[in-house]
Image: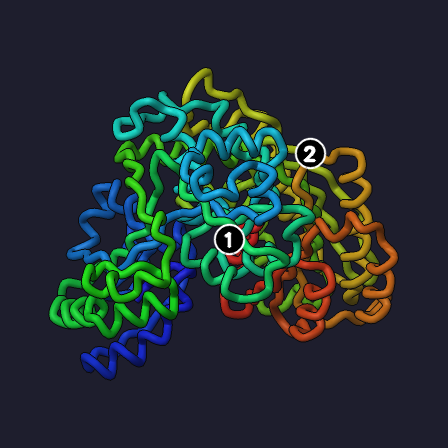
Amino acid sequence: MLATSDLKDAQPLEGMVEKATGVKLRFTFGGTMESTEAVLTARTDAHAAWFANAKYLLSDPQGQSRVKLQDKIMLSPITVGVSESAAKKLGWSDPAQAAKVTWKTIAQASAQGRLTYALSNPATSNQGFMALMGVVASASSKADALTAADVDRRAIADFLKGYKLPGDNSTYLAEKFIEQQGNQVNTFINYESWLLTLNNGGKLRERLVLVYPHEGVATADYPFMLLDDTRRADYQKVVAYLKSPEAQTWLARQTLRRPINAEVAATVADVFPKEGMRVELPFSPDRQLADGLIDAYLNEFRLPIASTFVLDTSGSMEGSGRRKQLVQAMHYIAGADNSLTGRLAKLTNRERVWLLPFSDVPGPLTFFQVPAGDPAARGVQVQEDSEAKQKILADVRNYADGLRMTGSTALYDSVLKALEHMLAQKKKSPGYQYSVVAFTDGENNKGRGLAEFKEAYAQLPEDVRGIPVFMVLFGEAKESDLKEMIATTGGRVFDARKTPLYAVFKDIRAYQ
């Protein structure tokens, strides 16, 4: 079964389903857009799929043809979790006042700098996309018939001014929100189940006030979908169990998602806020709206990206096809892949990129800047790459083609140089989202070691904490050291030994 990553907390169902039905259920997790594309293109061997929401998938005729049956299993509305102190300042701590808050109110508070939030990437995850769609629907007087041309561009811009902590999945975002609550962010927009879990977890600096926008919420209904009709009988057994009182009660109390079974819902009413299930915001079936909104988010409205890619060009990269992998990955982000996930991974308008090769020592930095596009006069639409952008993308591909592999591996010196460079750029141009992405296939064997790196990192200005380092691990790189470095710098380690390097690039882009 192909499942979106937010369902990892439901994985114990594997054993429960097998015991109750005899059907062996096995989860394979992926991001929303990645999983959607796998179903659309039939590039999955899964017999079934379980997503938080399948409205985007089923808005496409091809998606409709892939899904043979579907059943809703549980519910969790998109909710705005505001830190108690921020909610008090905003006047939302009183339940009567919180009940009047709309998406428009939330966007205005964001534009004023009073609400700063964590949210999964709207281009790659359902909760991020549905929150953005909520703002757009609220700003329109005809949400149920909303088209791409009707989108209020100012509402998007206002809402995204408060977007300070992006990420690809709820687990990562929850960890970062706990670290940054009260400093960088005061709000977490996510499924109700995640916010209730955080409030019950005892790790927050202060509890979250859960706000359910007055004009309506977008609810994840977790459709369980049959993809392989030869497994229809097994599918029906699994669905019957998932809707049974035993499974529904377990899901409600263990994952804090609301039961679809009304009788069970009455027995677990103590678990959930009474005001949670408001009127449902209508979802426009206009695929141009969805695609245009994602494109506009990536290329016009989001905080533009500035990153340094630290590229291992040591001699060991010549072996086992690693140089070829790295070159293909650079081609991938420079627009060589026109698939859905390829478009999401591509360098975006206004983006600044520095490429830093390294072997015995850090090499010279080479700078590329993607030009801004021409904004739509009204609404949103997918824009073709301008000639100027195509030239920059071609320049990046040509740079990658010219990489030569020789020498040893000065990884920590090179990451430190990239961080120092990003700090200097951040001071000059604060209106960007900064990160470092490093690729290596071997253990560090030149320059400073991990302990010396950590010592040097501790001497950097506090602003460095806002620059995550994403490490890509392949070859013989020492995983424990890389994970220890990430624990110091923030970010994530991606294992390219199990996943093609170009696919890793796609995952990294979701965190930027």
x, y percent for residue 281: 31, 37
Q: Is residue 100 left or right of residue 298?
A: left
Residue located beneath label 1 in the image: 168
Instruction: In this rendered view, identify the residue nearer to me: 123 or 106.
Output: 106
Amino acid tagged 1: Asp
Amino acid tagged 2: Gly
Can residue 156 be seen in the rendering of this structure? yes
Instruction: In this rendered view, identify the residue nearer to me: 386 or 1.
Output: 1
Say which quarter of the image contains residue 202: bottom right
Q: Circle 1: is it few (<14), some (14-19), or many (20+) Cα within 10 Å?
A: many
Say which quarter of the image contains residue 11: bottom left
Residue located beneath label 2 in the image: 431
Q: Is residue 477 left or right of residue 452?
A: left
Instruction: In this rendered view, identify the residue nearer to me: 118 or 209.
Output: 209
Mark closer to the chain start, 1 or 2? 1
Point 71% across, 49% down: residue: 466
Image quadrant containing the N terminus: bottom left
Point 46% across, 49% down: residue: 210
Point 61% across, 64% down: residue: 493
x, y percent for residue 259: 27, 61
x, y percent for residue 69: 16, 57
Q: Secondary structure at mark 2?
A: loop
Q: Circle 2: is it few (<14), some (14-19), or many (20+) Cα within 10 Å?
A: few
Q: Is residue 44 left or right of residue 453?
A: left
Q: Is residue 179 above or below residue 342?
A: below
Can residue 332 be seen in the rendering of this structure? no
Q: Secondary structure at mark 1?
A: loop
Q: Is residue 236 left or right of residue 145?
A: left
Which circle marks residue 7 in the picture?
none
